Image (tube, grey):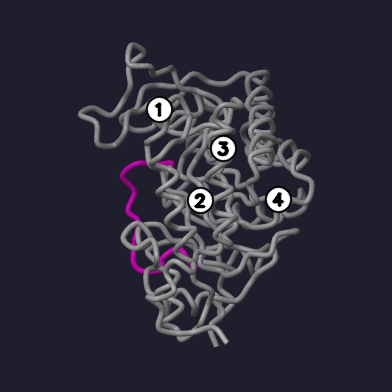
Amino acid sequence: MSELFSPITVGRCTIKNRAWVSPMCQYSAHDGVVGDWHRVHLGAFATGGAGLVMAEATAVEPEGRISLNCPGLWNDEQRDAWQPIVDFAHDCGATIGVQLAHAGRKGSTLAPWADHPHATIGEGGWRTVAPSAVAFTGYPVPLALSVAEIGRIVASFAEAAGRAISAGFDVIEIHAAHGYLLHQFLSPISNQRVDEYGGSFEHRVRMLVEVVDAVRARLGEVPLFVRLSATDWTEGGWDLPQTIALSRLLSDHGVDLIDVSSGGNVAGVHIPTSPGYQVPFAEAIRREAGIATSAVGLITEPAAADAIVREGRADAVMMARALLRNPRWALQAAETLGVAIDWPPQFDRARTLRVG
């Protein structure tokens, strides 16, 4: 019996299966406003049977974007552009979430396919910010945030969450992984502050906890996820024991699920990648912190994804590249596993297994 295609209830939200779409940057918004590309990109996953479609890293302020072409939720025009995408996902029976983010020192870039990586001020770029004036390898030196500026960014996360709820999103995820701003605060490699936001574990996690509290206050019973990098993959950096301790704390502050990834804060480290290589992190956090987790990382095969859930290693599986190759992965995976699920009626003639 497949567990991958069993429903799961997170907070007030029941999600029809555990094959989920990981947030994937598309670098295709204009002034933070999504358009036709995102409607087709995310709509394909909604029609493809995924239980949860998580929209990409969406900036809470203009300087929080990774690139000039990343989406945002810092104004109402951006909110209104998201709404038809959300409505379409709901019409397809999918749950849809959005990942709220601030890039910090890894911002002000051009799209990855541009002929140079960093946007100049003349091109619309900006001076980036971070916990400390410590550059990510190959990037300009950022400005260290003041305590007042930290408070302003916390408030921006809350305001963006309010707009996300107004647009109809079912799940909100806070991006605290992959070397972006909140991860920069967590890691002693990038956070060299000596005030209440740096130094000890309790101080380094303070900003993330403040963001969680501010966002949770806007959500009511809407599920709240946090994406964490479980390790920096280097000595002296953020690591799994700290991630477990943080996950316990976040659970106490109203977080429903930890979306577990790794890396991104230190360039050039050796990461021993293989199919499912990050699943042990999700498993350890689920077991030791007593909180639901999702697993990511080169998970491509239906049997492998199903085993992760069936064996209790994670509560759900998030996939990215496999779904870029085949947005109908979930429909095909269900048939491979011998599970008859609902298909969009427009696709029904292609199914091989019938419900009932």
Q: Is residue 7 above or below residue 90?
A: below
Number of marks in the image?
Answer: 4
Q: Residue furthest left?
A: 115
Q: Quadrant of residue 349?
A: bottom left
Q: CA distance from mark 4 to mark 1?
A: 28 Å
- Span shown in magenta: 265-280
What amino acid type is highlighted by mark number 3?
A: Leu
Residue 229's label in the rendered image is 2
Q: CA distance from mark 2 to mark 1?
A: 19 Å
The x and y percentages for residue 346 are: 44, 66
Q: Residue at x 32, y 28 (%)?
A: 110
Of the two numbered discs 4 and 1 in the rendering, the one whose residue sits closer to the viewer: 4
What amino acid type is highlighted by mark number 4?
A: Leu
Of the two numbered discs 2 and 1 in the rendering, the one whose residue sits closer to the viewer: 2
Along the line of sight, the residue nearer the viewer: 310 or 342: 342
Of helix, strand and loop, which one carries label 2? strand
Magenta stretch, overall SS: loop
Query: Which callout, 2 or 4, points at the residue further toward the start of the chain?
Result: 2
What amino acid type is highlighted by mark number 2?
A: Ser
Disc 4 target residue: 250
Of helix, strand and loop, which one carries label 1? loop
Disc 1 target residue: 135
Of helix, strand and loop, which one carries label 4? helix
Q: CA distance from mark 2 to mark 4?
A: 14 Å
Classify mark 4: residues with Cα within 10 Å, few (<14), some (14-19) or many (20+): many
Disc 3 target residue: 182
Q: CA distance from mark 1 to mark 3?
A: 15 Å
Residue 293 lies left or right of residue 122; in this view the side is right
The x and y percentages for residue 66 are: 43, 32
Q: CA distance from mark 2 to mark 3?
A: 11 Å
